[in-house]
Structure formats: structure tokens, C-alpha cells
Image (cartoon, rainbow, N blue to C red):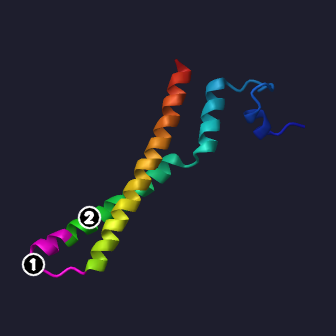
Amino acid sequence: MISSVEKLTNPTGNNRGLPPELRKRLLNESRHPFGGLRRLLWGALFGSAFIGFLIMATRSITGESVLLSDLGIQVGALALFGGLLFLDRKKISVANSDRKDSES
């Protein structure tokens, strides 16, 4: 007996009425699960790090002392979450452009 996963991954098998567009979308989602939720999480964490950095920069400009270790944590969080957001967007946008090319 052929499982449903084998039906989706077997391009020569009989898909029994599964439209090619749906098949490609399901395969894309299986390669990049929870893409939208992940981007939302990276965006929220990046925004939080950016707000924290702005608050620290404002404190520094007004003359209040800011610990270098705290500043390093904020810059590291900005770089980490910004990089994750950029890499995840690039991966998702490539997959979406492949889907649009196949539709036309």
C-alpha cells in the first residue's frame, strides 16, 4: 500500500486527482514548514531588540552611563535576529517565485 507521503513525493505515481498546484504547494510547505509564523517571530524579536537599542542609545546621548556588556547584548540581538529574518525571507521568497514560475 502506498502512503500519502509517497504519493506526494512520487512524481510518476498516480496522484488520484491531486492537482499539480496543490501538490507543489504541499511539497513547498513540507520543505519550509511554518514559514509565515517563523518570519513573524523573527520580526517581533528584531523589533524588540531594535527598541532596546534605541532606548540604550537615547540614554547614552543624554549622558547616562550604559554598560558596554548591555550594549553588546543589544547589538548581538539585532545582528542575530536581523540575520535570521533576512535568511528566512530569502529562502521563502525563492520558494514563492518558483511557485509563480510554475503557474504561468
Assess disc 1: are there few (<14), some (14-19) or many (≥20) residues with their C-alpha within 10 Å of its C-alpha.
Answer: few
C-alpha distance separating marks 1 and 2:
19 Å
Residue 27: x and y in percent read 64, 37
**Near-viewer residue (85 or 26):** 85
Q: Kindly identify which residue carries mark 2.
A: 51
Give the vertical position of 75 relative to 35 (above or below). Answer: below
Q: Kindly identify which residue carries mark 1.
A: 63
Residue 58 falls in which quadrant of the image? bottom left
Residue occupying image coordinates x 47% and y 48% = 88
Residue 22: x and y in percent read 63, 30
Residue 15 magenta-highlighted: no
Residue occupying image coordinates x 30% and y 77% = 70
Residue occupying image coordinates x 54% and y 21% = 103
Instruction: Name the amino acid, label 2.
Output: Ile
Residue 31: x and y in percent read 62, 43
Q: Horizontally, is 59 left or right of 78 in the view?
A: left
